[in-house]
Amino acid sequence: MSITGIDLGSRTIKIIEMDGQEIINHSLYDTVSFYRNCGRIADGEMTVDLAGLGFSRERIIATGYGKISVRIAGAEQIPEIQAHVYGALWQSGLQDFTLLDIGGQDTKVVQVRQGQMLDFLTNDRCAASSGRYLENMAAVLGMSLEELSSFSEEAVELNATCAIFGETELIARIVEGHPVSHLAAGVNYSLYRRVSAMLNRLRSKKIILAGGGALNSALAKIIARETGSAIYQLPRPQYNGAIGCCAWAWRHETA
């Protein structure tokens, strides 16, 4: 059976189609553009032309930030944390780990033991610990997110705990004449400090990175250096929630 998993993120929407254990199709869309161009609301549900996008409607599983306000017609809904755990289990093959998911608007830390979720923490009240923070700070520095992710050494200290104040502080450090590479490292280090309390509470010897934040290689280096844990990069970190939808359906179909 072909299964389509949809992760309704705050910044992007990820769709994965799996046939058994094989990924056969995947796409990523800007959230606002997707809602505007690919969906139609009727009776409180959004009908999505998945066939027109090249995906099967045989069985659909949806999750994510947006599932609270937007229900996909014909889709089964599963909790976001559950989807990300199943995705991490499927992609990594590990059974004991801490999952750090840095999304566009929130951050999730989940402790998994023997393939089961033991505990989790989320931070969805402050954009300063999310991917949106990295986007804003990269824009201030005049560089891409890919460039930003190159810097992890000689970090300039950035202490502001709010995303808006963080931009103001960064501009002040630019005026002081610090090298851009040190400022970029400071941005990456400041994001680590904002998630470190959650990581310390749910510590593991192995940390899996997921979400758009997992594409930041500098952040991975900083976390490894500061925690002493082994860092695992998933093959498709941004698609982890959508993959988890499919893995959940496959697991419950064969259980």
Image (cartoon, rainbow, N blue to C red):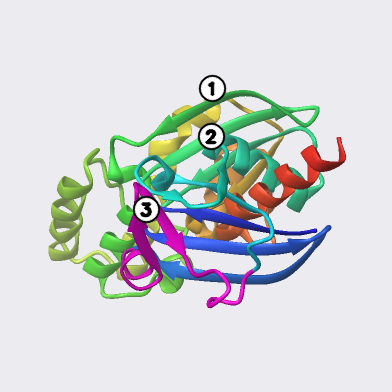
Q: Quadrant of the C terminus?
A: top right
Which residue is at 43% across, 45% downward? 67
Can residue 204 be seen at all in this image of the molecule?
yes
Q: Position of residue 171 (x, y in %)?
A: 15, 60
Q: Could you say whether the residue bearing mark 3 is in a helix, strand or loop?
A: loop
Quarter where residue 154 is shown: bottom left
Residue under pointer 2? 109
- Residues under numbered marks 2 and 1 in contact, where contact means CB atoms less than 8 Å apart: yes
Q: Position of residue 129 (x, y in %)?
A: 36, 43
Which residue is at 17% across, 51% downward? 169
Q: Along the polypeptide, which appears first: circle 2 or circle 1?
A: 2
Find residue 10 and name its label. Answer: 3
- The answer to whether 62 appears left or right of 251 in the picture is left
Task: Judge by depth and name the residue closer to the eye, 250 or 139.
Answer: 250
Gap between marks 2 and 1 measured at Cα: 9 Å
From the image, state whether disc 2 or disc 1 is nearer to you. Answer: 2
Q: Along the polypeptide, which appears first: circle 3 or circle 2?
A: 3
- The answer to whether 177 appears left or right of 15 in the picture is left
Gap between marks 1 and 3 measured at Cα: 26 Å
**Magenta stretch, residue numbers:** 32-55
Q: Could you say whether the residue bearing mark 2 is in a helix, strand or loop?
A: strand
Q: Residues within 10 Å of mark 1 (few under 14, many from 20)?
A: few
Residue under pointer 1? 201
Mark 2: amino acid = Val
Q: Residues within 10 Å of mark 3 (few under 14, many from 20)?
A: some
Mark 3: amino acid = Ser
